[in-house]
Amino acid sequence: MSDLPRKAVTRTAKLAALPLGFAGRATWGLGKRIVGESAELVGRELQQRTADQLFKVLGELKGGAMKFGQALSVFESALPEEVAGPYRAALTKLQEAAPPMPTRTVHAVLAKRLGEDWLELFQEFEDKPSAAASIGQVHRAVWHDGREVAVKVQYPGAGEALLSDLNQLSRFARLLGPLVPGMDIKPLINELRDRVSEELDYDLEAQAQQAHAEEFLDDPDVVVPGVVHQCEQVLVTEWMGGTPLSEIISDGTKEQRDRAGQLLARFLFSGPARTGLLHADPHPGNFRLLPGGPEGEEDWRLGVLDFGTVDRLPGGLPAPIGHSLRMTLEGDADFVYTHLREEGFVRESIDLEPDAVLDYLLPIIEPARVEEFTFTRGWMRSQAARVADPRSPAYQLGKKLNLPPSYLLIHRVTLSTIGVLCQLGATVRLREELEQWLPGFVQVEDADGPVGTEAVDGGDEADDTVGVEEAEEIRLPGQQKAEAESAREPEEQPEGRSGDQPEDGPGHTFGDETGDAVGDGSGERSAAQT
């Protein structure tokens, strides 16, 4: 592997080879059966060859192809075991590794963005990448002030490749069906494509990561590396060690799996409430398990990486989600149906039976009904089979539901997180996290209730059930985003962009020379961002 392949014809040909290769291997398998080999052995080898090609093509191309592969990898627990097994190892590789770009290319990008004397910014710099991901790779280094850092370098041509891959994958979506049976691929591809500009903007990523780093600075459970320096195509953050979540999934103890699952759920719901941002790339490669939790070195904390894709939710997760979830658990079919229609989940032209909608939702929200729930691949597969089987009532009803654009990313992140929890096989007190962090989930009478409840429900004088006529007080996600945009003042150029801080290179340096704004300089809060 030399450089990131950028020629559209080359990349298109590689992507086209996926469905064509599947068809060719199916023919090969038929030939094997004709000469007498067993169906089980042929099928296993066929699936393994398909998985190998899937990883090879998506990993080599990086860009949108690899981003698509990473997004798929968290859903493998929803596939039937006989299909998921051969793909699991290949897809998991995409969460942690990819063929690196050449050293000369890395040096060229750093020289262009940080200056020809870029090496003077570092005491040490490792040319071998510690991680390679969809649009960039990470190098371990020591910043000029002695801090261990992760240097994230964007692949040249990443934007062009990202858009090209996702456009091609969208055209091939139906042909890719055999690779991931039962999964609707095209909406996933379209949503990834809509996020391209944000994914490529390291300035936005730095802002989102620093907001989390500051909010979670003294948190006993969650660790986010601070940002050290940022400029176009280069992002320098504190280094973070720890055990990748992918390794916890494959080899972790039950205690580690449960702790990781609990903290992952906590971060999913507390992040928006505390920062107004939703981390929107929850695949296992973006999380680490670190020692030193609230109970000491034998306890664990969750390290969180890669803030390239976030959803901006100034009021936290939308209160209608909490209200609908609570009333679904209480069995109020009429309220739930009316609320879903008001939010746009049921179009005006569609009429459904409220009880049928309730029956559709109840199995999905089972983890919120009990005090603790064990997420398993089997449970995930049963839910996927229920809503994907054309013969089932759930499938017929699901086709009539609508997903409003303002909820699209929230929906994907939630499903992805559940997918990771099922990969972990974690026992999680999900209801506890919902009560603490999800606006609208707890009734207003709980005056001493969880964080965010009074802000959502309006205080002690409010009625315990918020009707659809009060929606303007809740603020829908689209309204929240519009208010945030209108309230946002034009951003000033950060200091240093004009070159008035040459000691840190061109770009935006976060914190002072001692790094007080981004950590204690010990390197313990750092991370290899992927």
Image: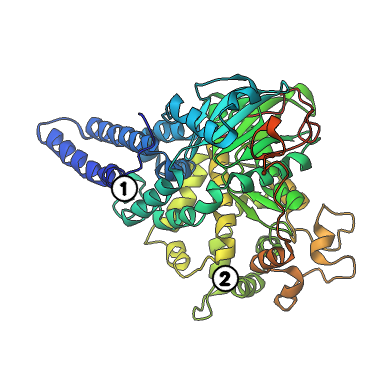
Number of labelled discs? Answer: 2
Answer whether residue 476 is visible to the viewer in this image: yes
Type of amino acid under label 2: Asp
Q: Is residue 381 left or right of residue 10?
A: right
Assess whether mark 2 and mark 1 are in contact (beta carbons under 8 angstroms): no
Q: Residue furthest left?
A: 35
Q: Is residue 361 left or right of residue 97?
A: right
Q: Residue sitting at 84 percent across and 61 percent down?
A: 454
Answer whether residue 262 is visible to the viewer in this image: no
**Residue topped by disc 1:** 8
Q: Nearer the viewer, residue 142 or 217?
A: 142
Could you say whether the residue bearing mark 1 is in a helix, strand or loop?
helix
Say few, some or many: other residues with alpha carbon within 10 Å of mark 2 (under 14 / 14 to 19 / 20 or more): some
Type of amino acid under label 1: Ala
Mark found first going from the N terminus, 1 or 2: 1
Q: Residue sitting at 83 percent across and 63 percent down?
A: 444
Picture quadrant where residue 143 is located: top right
Q: Nearer the viewer, residue 273 or 62?
A: 62
Which of the numbered marks, if any, corresponds to residue 355? 2
